[in-house]
Image: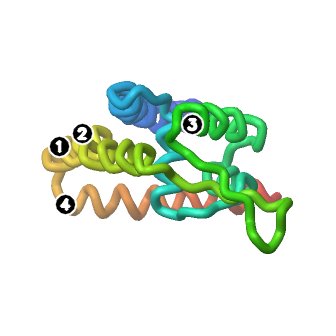
């Protein structure tokens, strides 16, 4: 168990550091990390329904609904009612929403920080790291289905 705890803490530590960079990027745009995730997801896949958006972000519908409402109020997201099914609402970015998403992409601090760190590590170690991470993901998937 001690080794498992060390590995989990290692993953958590890296995730925490990367989240700090992401949070800084989001705050510089007047957004939360989750709001930025919504904008970037809608930029990559315009016209998603709320259900589709929650699935892509792996978050509860109520949480994403609150974020979307805030973004609608801020003029960054539009709700578009389907012409064929009045019950269906699709989400799209406004021009301001697209601009914020593009600004975020222009300053990807977490990716820049990771790139900086990886330049200090031999390429063979990085390939081993990626292979091991994939192996762990696969094994964790088989454990959860037990």
Q: Is residue 80 above or below residue 82?
A: above
Residue identifier under label 4 = 123
* CA neighbours of label 4 inside 10 A, class few (<14), some (14 to 19), many (20+): few
For discs 4 and 3, the disc positioned in front in the rendered view: 3
User: Of callouts 2 and 4, which one flags the residue occurring earlier in the amino acid sequence?
Assistant: 2
User: Of callouts 3 and 1, which one flags the residue occurring earlier in the amino acid sequence?
Assistant: 3
User: Of callouts 4 and 3, which one flags the residue occurring earlier in the amino acid sequence?
Assistant: 3
* Residue in the image at 76% along x and 43% along y: 61
Q: Are marks 4 and 1 in contact (CB under 8 Å)?
A: no
Q: Are marks 1 and 2 in contact (CB under 8 Å)?
A: yes
Q: Are marks 3 and 1 in contact (CB under 8 Å)?
A: no
- Mark 3 to mark 1 CA distance (whole Å): 33 Å
- Mark 4 to mark 1 CA distance (whole Å): 13 Å
User: Of callouts 2 and 3, which one flags the residue occurring earlier in the amino acid sequence?
Assistant: 3
For discs 2 and 4, the disc positioned in front in the rendered view: 2
Residue identifier under label 1 = 116
Q: What kind of element bears circle 3?
A: helix
* CA neighbours of label 3 inside 10 A, class few (<14), some (14 to 19), many (20+): many
* Residue in the image at 25% along x and 42% along y: 107
* CA neighbours of label 1 inside 10 A, class few (<14), some (14 to 19), many (20+): few
Q: Quadrant of residue 89?
A: bottom right
Query: Which label belongs to residue 24?
Result: none
Residue that extends furthest to the bottom in the rendered view of this protein: 84
Residue identifier under label 2 = 113
């Amino acid at each position: 168990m001690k080794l498992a705890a060390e590995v989990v803490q290692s993953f958590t530590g890296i995730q925490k550091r990367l989240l700090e960079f992401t949070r800084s990027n989001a705050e510089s745009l007047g957004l939360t990390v989750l709001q930025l995730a919504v904008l970037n997801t809608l930029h990559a896949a315009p016209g998603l329904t709320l259900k589709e958006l929650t699935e892509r972000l792996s978050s509860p519908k109520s949480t994403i609904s609150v974020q979307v409402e805030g973004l609608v109020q801020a003029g960054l997201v539009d709700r578009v009612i389907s012409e064929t099914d009045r019950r269906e609402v699709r989400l799209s970015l406004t021009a301001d929403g697209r601009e914020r998403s593009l600004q975020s992409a222009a300053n990807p601090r977490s990716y820049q920080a990771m790139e900086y760190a990886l330049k200090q590590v031999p390429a063979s170690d990085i390939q081993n790291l990626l292979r091991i991470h994939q192996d762990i993901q696969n094994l964790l998937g088989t454990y959860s289905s037990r």
